[in-house]
Amino acid sequence: KQEVTQIPAALSVPEGENLVLNCSFTDSAIYNLQWFRQDPGKGLTSLLLIQSSQREQTSGRLNASLDKSSGRSTLYIAASQPGDSATYLCAVAYTSGTYKYIFGTGTRLKVLA
Amino acid sequence: ETGVTQSPTHLIKTRGQQVTLRCSSQSGHNTVSWYQQALGQGPQFIFQYYREEENGRGNFPPRFSGLQFPNYSSELNVNALELDDSALYLCASSFKGTEKLFFGSGTQLSVL
């Protein structure tokens, strides 16, 4: 069964700290992996997309890495800010004609001022 | 460039009723996917439409059905509503081949 797991489920850090969110997936035959941000009661915003042939992607203070062989991805957030407080979701698309995404349950991040 | 818009934002129905949720895709996108997100969970794939045809379906019963129109807008229909259908329903559009998803803000459905 294809599953995506995110650890930790919740995280609280002081402003300015660098942090790492983890995502693991059970089947390494992925097409791509996306990291999303979700604010309470809202839709999802795509942060970074990593194709299966890539090792990492960067956008501003965010860096996502992908290790297919170990079934892991990490999202690194540098110099965290209170505005980064949200739920971060990892989603994996497997090699298929549909590219349906399988989501983890997310990491709820709170950055304290 | 317009984003993905969903309507209505909130909806309350009673068990056994039928509901239609609507989604307008981002300009230039030809694929739309629908997801169900229960409280505290990650979104679950319901189905995807490409060029007005269903292009894959998740583990949802046939009472969940959809349509995609020539202008790439879409509808999600749910018949015979059950209490467990209470969730945030998310629409996402994309351009086939890239698969970067752009989500709407969702419709919060409550079934009483």
Image (tube, rainbow, N blue to C red):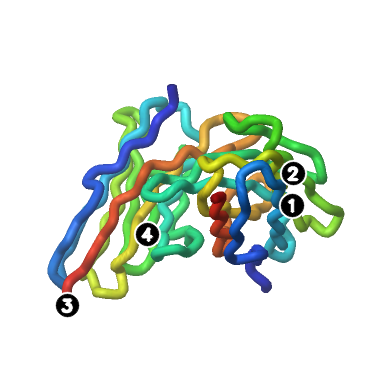
Give the spatial CA distance, label 2 vs label 1: 5 Å
Give the spatial CA distance, label 2 vs label 4: 36 Å
Q: Nearer the viewer, mark 1 or mark 4?
A: 1
Give the spatial CA distance, label 1 vs label 4: 35 Å
Q: Quadrant of residue B29?
A: bottom right
Q: Name the spot of residue B78 as percent of width and height, x first.
A: 68, 43
User: Which label sits on residue A58?
Assistant: 4
Which quarter of the image is occupied by the N terminus of chain B? bottom right
Q: Nearer the viewer, mark 2 or mark 3?
A: 2
| Amino acid at circle 1 | Glu
The subunit carrying tag 4 is A
Q: Residue at x 60, y 29 (%)?
A: A96
A46 lies above or below B66: below
User: Which label sits on residue A54?
Assistant: none
Both marks 2 and 4 on one chain = no
Q: Nearer the viewer, mark 3 or mark 1?
A: 1
Q: Nearer the viewer, mark 3 or mark 4?
A: 3
Judge the density around disc 4: few (<14), some (14-19), many (≥20) Cα neighbours within 10 Å: some
Q: Determine the secondary structure under disc 2.
A: strand
The subunit carrying tag 1 is B
Q: Name the spot of residue B110 as percent of width and height, x first.
A: 54, 54
User: Which label sits on residue A113?
Assistant: 3
Identify the residue position indicated by label 2 in the image.
Answer: B66
Give the spatial CA distance, label 2 vs label 3: 44 Å
A16 vs B40, left or right, is left
Circle 2/circle 4 CB separation < 8 Å? no
Judge the density around disc 2: few (<14), some (14-19), many (≥20) Cα neighbours within 10 Å: many
Both marks 3 and 4 on one chain = yes
Give the spatial CA distance, label 3 vs label 1: 42 Å
Q: Residue at x 33, y 63 (%)?
A: A86
The subunit carrying tag 3 is A
Give the spatial CA distance, label 3 vs label 4: 25 Å
